[in-house]
Each structure stands twice: as C-alpha cells, then as structure tokens.
Amino acid sequence: MAARKVQKEKPKYQCRHCQHSYDWHEKNWKGELFMCRCKFHTDGKYCLFLSHPQCEHFLKREGTDNGTPE
C-alpha cells in the first residue's frame, strides 16, 4: 500500500515582503532583483534569495503588495 504524502503548507509571504530584507541586488535577465541581505541570516554577511519563504522574524513590509523596495 502506498503511503500518502503530507503536503506542507506553502508560506504566504517571501523575503521580498519582509521589512528586514535590505540591499536588494543581482538582477536576472529580465532586470528583476533576486538577492537580498537580512540581519537575522548570519548577521547580514551572506545573501538570500528574495523568493525564500518567510522565517520566524518576518514583519510585513508596509505599503507594498508586490514586495518592491521603497
């Protein structure tokens, strides 16, 4: 009998929607930014993808629905 896979709930928000993401950089071939830094991720030393799922430190960025930097 095949075991049923339990699907994890997909987070509603990503790093691009968080107030803590900063220093958005690295453009893809379409000209969209896809990398950022976060003070909670290795003290901001290393980069994250803006598409990473939200973490336990997530605070929603005010005034933006699409996650563009202000």
Image: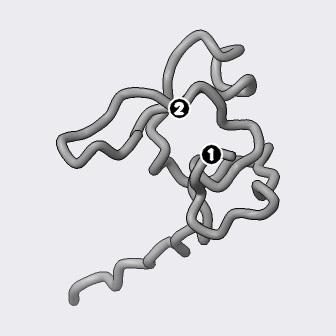
43 is higher (above) or lower (below) than 63: above
Residue ID for mark 2:
24
Q: Nearer the viewer, residue 40 or 61?
A: 61
Q: Residue at x 49, y 23 (%)?
A: 47
Q: Residue at x 32, y 34 (%)?
A: 27
Question: Image check: 21 left or right of 28?
Answer: right
Q: Secondary structure at mark 1?
A: loop
Whole-percent x and y of residue 6?
Answer: 44, 78
Q: Residue furthest top?
A: 45
- What crowding class fits label 2: few (fewer than 14 Cα within 10 Å), some (14-19), or many (20 or more)? some
Q: Secondary structure at mark 2?
A: strand
Whole-percent x and y of residue 4?
Answer: 34, 85
Question: Image check: 60 left or right of 15?
Answer: right
17 is higher (above) or lower (below) than 29: below
Q: Cβ–Cβ below 8 Å for labels 1 and 2?
A: yes
Task: Give residue 13's mark.
Answer: none
Q: Residue at x 55, y 54 (%)?
A: 53
Identity of the amino acid at label 2? Answer: Trp
**Residue 39, quarter of the rendered image:** top right
Q: Nearer the viewer, residue 52 or 26?
A: 26
- What crowding class fits label 1: few (fewer than 14 Cα within 10 Å), some (14-19), or many (20 or more)? some
Identity of the amino acid at label 1? Answer: Pro
**Residue 25, quarter of the rendered image:** top left
Question: Image check: 2 left or right of 47?
Answer: left
**Residue 62, quarter of the rendered image:** bottom right
Q: CA distance from mark 1 to mark 2?
A: 8 Å
Residue ID for mark 1:
69
- Nearest to N terminus: mark 1 or mark 2: 2
Question: Image check: 64 left or right of 50?
Answer: right
Identify the image's colour scheme: rainbow, by chain, secondary structure or one colour: one colour
Q: How many marks?
A: 2
